[in-house]
Image: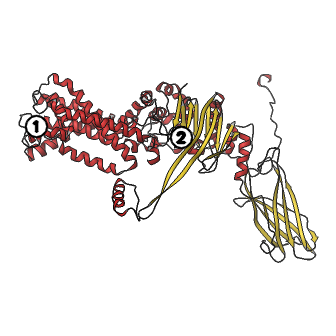
């Protein structure tokens, strides 16, 4: 028979086993978020297709036609924007959903026990689904622009994984802080808004190649490496990504993941007292 | 076998009493206050921390198959104890060892999503409560049947009536099959018929050897369902043991209304220059091991008053009223000629007569059977607790009186004899 010991500050031995045991709940929470998303809408899931296309059209107009940004490598600007947008959307919505996941499920936190980590984990489901839909929509654009993908395509999951971990770990840190200080609810949208301009979403790094601090760029913005890496997977001979420049991202993601886990585990047992 | 063992479990909350403008609810305030305190040494912005112990050194053991009722007034720490046991919050001190799967029902319909249909919510809520998908599938029809929502299975629960919502919530939890079940006040909701269903289901669960911890203010339900009880007060466990013993101790504690009012000083006593009240007493004839009034207890009402009149024909008219002010009955003494001095009257209210509830005594002193000399209104307030056996109905027993009248029932004819 299963024995549970409850004690102050006790790090539950079976914590990770518990997460496996509760995997059905993880799945059901994820399905809940996805089903609820398009309830009472007329075109339903089609929104997942309409939204990225609209975004890309507006950005191409604003950045390419109005602001006259060109890409020196000669890649179709639509593809630069599209790849940037679906990746950034994934990161941004995942980060936002995760950071609201604890306060958004306050009724569960105060009424029932399960490993709290399930809440941030399950809230990545919606952005992940959106990413896959966006990826499928990207295919006709690639064909139209005459781009034929090569074996680099198989590296997509690698960059997706890093984006996933970055969004999750940053989100978890913010989610834990958000329980006690709702200020973080205000900060998160700002980060997302500024992040869009700081990261090479609607432009590629070719635009900043001439700047004196360019050699440190990936150290200053570890997320940039993920987006450029994603483009490198889809666009043959894409020049702005090297595995060296990806090193800062790897270090960054590992660090935030460790911090997030320690931070969350330390605070999760007292969430209910502050929520 | 001991399934739950708690050793010196305590839970502390820190309450901040803030002076001045030193509120630190938002991050900004924490930062600004920290900086300000660095320079001002916090002269004006002192935050007083006060420890509040919601639970203090609670230790107990619960054996397998026990049905334990937790009783206590509001703020006694009952709900905190359940929260600690169900791992929602962790104790500040102490240790609890639990053997077996625990399901806690601190609320029915936990995690219901208003946009999802009844069907989807059954799976969602079931999973939240720790049921496996197969288990939910197995019980699905029984759940729907129990809740009576077949027609609305595919309607979002936001369109449910509150009754349907609660029924569906309870139906799911009633089909949980954990070894230990922790239940908080589920009976506060739903209509009488539904409450009966719930309690019946809990009784079934307990006969199948499951351990149940049950918090309720419905003492009748606790008495009927539980074989053991815990009495808590101000975060401490006062007593734990057989239900009847604990309940009678608890009830004698909460029957705070004094069963007598006595005035030793004539000048302070209510009345006028002709009569003044000396005392009103309610004297229960307790049964063995009884220390509080319940429907089985007979009791005497004794009244004493000072009479300042010579040669007066006096009688007392006694009213027993419900707390809403309706008169339940009125009795009068014979009218007798009295001299100055102390006069006393006594009557006996039989057992199995008044129903459970709160009552007030009022009486008038009447001269010559016609003129009221003084009306002592609400001279005494008393409570009668419920007691019943041989029934699974734990709702409020209706009516003001509760006579024990023989009511035989029998089979008159058999169908195949016709």
The residue nearer to you, when weighing B114 against A17, is A17
Position in image of residue B370 (x %, y %): 86, 72
Q: Is B350 on the left or on the right of B226, as rendered?
A: right
Assess disc 1: are there few (<14), some (14-19) or many (≥20) residues with their C-alpha within 10 Å of its C-alpha. some
The chain ID associated with circle 2 is B
Q: For residue B315, what is the image quadrant?
A: bottom right
Position in image of residue A70 (x %, y %): 7, 40
Label 2: which secondary element? helix
Q: Which residue is mark 2?
A: B84
Position in image of residue A215 (x %, y %): 12, 38
Q: For residue B223, what is the image quadrant?
A: top right
The residue nearer to you, when weighing A226 against A45, is A226
Give the Cα distance between marks 1 and 2.
58 Å
Q: Is A161 on the left or on the right of A29, as rendered?
A: left
Total number of numbered labels? 2
Position in image of residue B213 (x %, y %): 61, 37
Q: Which mark is residue B121?
A: none
Q: Which residue is mark 1?
A: A77
Q: Quadrant of the C terminus of chain B?
A: top right
User: Which residue is located at x 13 percent, y 36 percent?
Assistant: A80
User: Does the rendering let one see residue A92?
Assistant: yes
The chain ID associated with circle 1 is A
Label 1: which secondary element? helix
The residue nearer to you, when weighing B381 against A22, is A22
Asked if labels 1 and 2 share a chain, the reply is no
Q: Is A122 on the left or on the right of B85, as rendered?
A: left
User: Which residue is located at x 15 percent, y 38 percent?
Assistant: A81
The residue nearer to you, when weighing A132 against A4, is A4
């Amino acid at each position: 028979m299963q024995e549970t010991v409850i004690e102050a500050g006790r790090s539950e031995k079976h914590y990770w086993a518990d997460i496996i045991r509760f995997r059905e709940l993880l799945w059901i929470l994820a399905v809940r978020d996805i089903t609820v998303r398009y309830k009472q809408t007329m075109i339903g899931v089609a929104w997942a297709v309409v939204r990225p296309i609209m975004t890309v059209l507006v950005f191409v107009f604003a950045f390419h036609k109005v602001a006259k940004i060109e890409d020196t490598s000669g890649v179709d600007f639509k593809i630069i924007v599209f790849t940037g947008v679906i990746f950034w959307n994934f990161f941004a919505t995942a980060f936002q959903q995760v950071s609201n996941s604890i306060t958004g499920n306050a009724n569960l936190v105060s009424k029932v026990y399960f490993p709290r980590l399930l809440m941030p984990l399950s809230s990545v489901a919606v952005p992940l689904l959106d990413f896959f839909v966006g990826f499928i929509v990207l295919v006709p654009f690639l064909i139209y622009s005459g781009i034929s993908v090569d074996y680099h395509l198989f590296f997509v999951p690698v960059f997706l994984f890093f984006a996933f971990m970055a969004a999750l770990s940053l989100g978890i840190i913010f989610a834990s802080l958000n329980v006690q200080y709702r200020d973080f609810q205000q900060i998160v949208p700002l980060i997302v808004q500024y992040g869009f301009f700081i990261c090479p979403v609607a432009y590629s790094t070719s635009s900043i190649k001439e700047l004196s601090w360019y050699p440190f760029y990936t150290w200053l913005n570890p997320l940039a490496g993920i987006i450029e890496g994603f483009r490198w997977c889809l666009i043959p001979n894409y020049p702005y990504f090297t595995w060296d420049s990806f090193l800062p991202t790897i270090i960054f993601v590992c660090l935030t993941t460790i911090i997030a886990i320690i931070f969350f585990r330390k605070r999760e047992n007292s969430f209910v007292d502050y929520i | 076998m001991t399934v739950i063992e708690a050793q010196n479990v305590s839970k502390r909350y820190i309450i901040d009493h803030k002076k001045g403008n030193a509120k630190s609810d938002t991050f900004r305030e924490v930062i600004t206050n920290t900086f300000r305190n660095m320079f001002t040494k916090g002269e004006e912005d002192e935050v007083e921390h006060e420890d509040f112990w919601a639970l203090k050194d609670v230790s107990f053991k619960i054996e397998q198959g026990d049905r334990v009722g937790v009783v206590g007034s509001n703020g006694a720490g009952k709900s905190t104890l359940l929260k600690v046991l169900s791992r929602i919050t962790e104790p500040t001190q102490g240790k609890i060892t639990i053997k077996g799967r625990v399901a806690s029902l601190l609320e029915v319909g936990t995690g219901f999503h208003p946009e999802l249909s009844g069907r989807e919510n059954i799976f969602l809520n079931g999973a939240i409560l720790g049921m496996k998908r197969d288990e939910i599938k197995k019980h699905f029809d029984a759940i729907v049947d129990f809740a009576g929502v077949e027609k609305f299975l595919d309607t979002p629960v936001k369109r449910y009536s509150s009754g349907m919502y609660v029924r569906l919530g309870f139906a799911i939890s009633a089909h949980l099959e954990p070894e230990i079940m922790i239940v908080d006040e589920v009976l506060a909701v739903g209509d009488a018929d539904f409450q009966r269903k719930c309690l019946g289901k809990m009784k079934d669960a307990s006969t199948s050897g499951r351990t149940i911890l049950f918090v309720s203010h419905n003492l009748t339900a606790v008495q009927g369902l539980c074989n053991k009880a815990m009495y808590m007060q101000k975060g401490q466990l006062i007593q734990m043991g057989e239900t009847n013993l604990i309940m009678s101790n608890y009830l004698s504690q909460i029957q705070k209304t004094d069963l007598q009012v006595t005035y030793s000083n004539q000048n302070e006593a209510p009345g006028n220059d002709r009569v003044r009240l000396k005392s009103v007493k309610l004297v229960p004839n307790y049964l063995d091991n009884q220390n509080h009034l319940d429907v089985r207890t007979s009791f005497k009402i004794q009244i004493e008053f000072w009479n300042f009149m010579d040669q007066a024909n006096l009688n007392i008219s006694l009213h027993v009223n419900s707390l809403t002010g309706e008169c339940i009955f009125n009795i009068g003494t014979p009218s007798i000629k009295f001299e100055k001095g102390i006069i006393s009257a006594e009557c006996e209210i039989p057992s199995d007569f008044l129903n459970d509830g709160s009552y007030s005594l009022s009486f008038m002193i009447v001269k010559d059977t016609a003129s009221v000399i003084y009306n002592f209104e609400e001279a005494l307030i008393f409570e009668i607790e419920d007691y019943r056996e041989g029934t699974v109905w734990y709702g409020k027993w209706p009516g003001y009186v509760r006579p024990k009248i023989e009511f035989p029932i029998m089979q008159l004819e058999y169908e195949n004899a016709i």
